[in-house]
Image: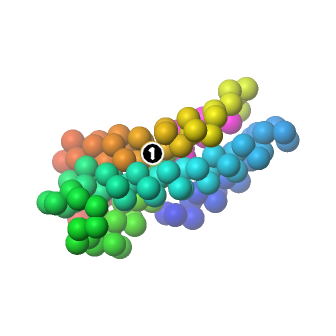
Amino acid sequence: MFCMKAGFLYVEVSFSKQDKRRRVVLAKYIDIFAGTFGFWLFGYAVSGNTDQGAVGEEQDYIFWFFRYTFATNTATIIGGTLVGHDVQMRAAAAFVYSFVMTAFIHPSLLESSGRLAVT
C-alpha cells in the first residue's frame, strides 16, 4: 500500500507540465511527512483503535502502519486532482491539508462507519 505513493507520483508527473513537476514531487513528500506526523499524533487515536488516545501509548505498530498508509494515500489522491489545472497550492497549505486529512478527516470517517480496514 505504501508503494502506491510512487505510482501516484508517476501518474501525476506524467499529467503535469514540465515546469510544474517539481511541485508535484514536493507535494508527495509533504504528504508523507505531514501524514506521518498527523496520523501518529492524532489519527490513530481518532480512528478508534486505542483506548488511551495519548501519544506514545502501547500500540500495534504493524496495524498502525497499515492504517497510516491508507490515510496518507487518501491525502495523496485528493491532492492529485490539482495536477491538471493551473492551480498551485503553497507548501504550507499542502502541509496543513495533509495534516488535517490524515489526523482528523480520514480517521473520523473510519470511526463513524463502524468498520475497520482489517479485522
> Picture quarter containing residue 64?
bottom left
Is 69 placed above or below 108 here? Answer: below
Residue positioned most to the right: 18
Q: Is residue 110 left or right of residue 93?
A: left
Magenta stretch: give its range: 76-83
Q: If the image is split into quadrants, where does the C terminus sit? A: bottom left
At 23% from the left and 72% from the top, the residue drawn is 58
- Where residue 52 appears, x then y in whole percent? 16, 60
Q: Main secondary structure of the magenta part?
A: helix
Q: Mark 1: which secondary structure?
A: helix
At 21% from the left and 57% from the top, the residue drawn is 53
Tag 1: residue type? Answer: Phe
Q: Nearer the viewer, residue 65 or 7?
A: 65
- Where residue 40 appears, x then y in whole percent? 37, 59
Does residue 41 show up magenta in the picture?
no
* Residue at the spot of label 1: 99
Is 66 placed above or below 19 here? Answer: below
Q: Is residue 12 left or right of residue 60?
A: right
- Where residue 118 appears, x then y in whole percent? 29, 63
Q: Nearer the viewer, residue 100 or 118?
A: 100
Residue 82 visible in the current orientation = no
Residue 35 visible in the current orientation = yes
Label 1 crowd (10 A; few <14 / some 14-19 / many >=20): many
Q: Nearer the viewer, residue 36 or 84?
A: 36
